[in-house]
Amino acid sequence: MKKILLLLSLLFLSACGSRGTFLDDFLVLSGSSMGQIDQYFDLDEKQHQRLEKDIDNDLNRLRKERFKEIAQTLRKIEKKAESSDPKIMSSAYRDLQAHYKDASSYFTTSTNTLISSLKPEQIANFEKQVRQEIKDTKEALNHPDSLNEEIIGRYKKGLEFWIGDLSLSQNQDIAKFAKEHPFPWKEKIKNKEAILAKFIDSKSSEQKMKAFAEKFVTNYDSVRTPEYAKAIASYENEVQDFLDSFWKTLSPDQKSRMKDYLLTRADKLESLAKK
């Protein structure tokens, strides 16, 4: 499943995924790219190049310090796939979520680089685009089926990533879950509005902006609203229950594909960690 992020951390962390295989492949982030960072802030060439360099440096540190540990987690998941453990997918979800939170703290340099380089008009552009996203989501609430289809698409892509093509009944199971357990969009909107307000408040000084952005990247739980934290925690419990039930529907070929994929990626991570 894709981790739904907000505001600045979406940009920094997802960008790192686009520059290698690690975050996109194993933590399944949003797939944003440097191009999307440029879109938010309209970076000039010098800013773009500096940010790319710092992202590379942050990712290199993550590679050296954490890739081996994450590879070990993937191998543990692969071993569990051989057992009759009915909680394999939910436990894998939680384990990778923990790695994601740890990995996010490695990108404070990239965050500070961008904050330090921003011009007032670029900050204004960011605010404008985020406000438009909030407006679009609010309007989409009048058409819940479209939002539901968005979630279904994310689930399908995330699961296909691990096990390959889905069967007709598996696609139906996903659609049924998404319909019966709607994502907390209203709480997400209010959370996004609250975080944007904090970001705007911090722009009175570069140091305040850096402090806010760094806190967002390293400890997102501390800046989101209690209402959204509660709603998303409940929703993620429902997702994990669904994953456990979904595991029972996997064919031998799908389980084999997942095991092969885990081992291949673990090998890749361990190879990268040695460089």
Image: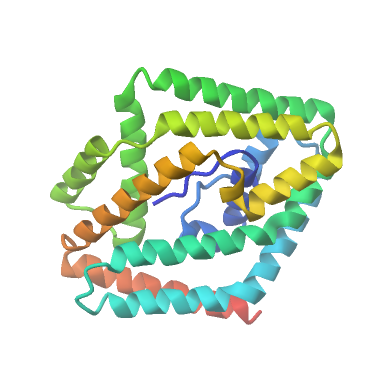
User: Relative to residue 164, is residue 6 drawn left or right?
Assistant: right
The one nearer the camera, 145 or 241, is: 241
In the image, residue 178 sits, relative to residue 274, either above or below, namely above
How far across and how far down the image is residue 120, in percent? 83, 28
In the image, residue 102 sits, relative to residue 235, either above or below, namely below
User: Relative to residue 198, is residue 161 drawn left or right?
Assistant: left
In the image, residue 42 sits, relative to residue 161, either above or below, namely above
Asked whether residue 197 is in view, the answer is yes
Q: How many marks?
A: 0
How far across and how far down the image is residue 39, in percent? 66, 33
The residue sitting at 41% across, 21% down in the picture is: 140
The residue sitting at 55% across, 78% down in the picture is: 68
The residue sitting at 18% across, 46% down in the picture is: 173
Quarter occupied by the C terminus: bottom right
Asked whether residue 21 is in view, the answer is no
How far across and how far down the image is residue 40, in percent? 67, 33
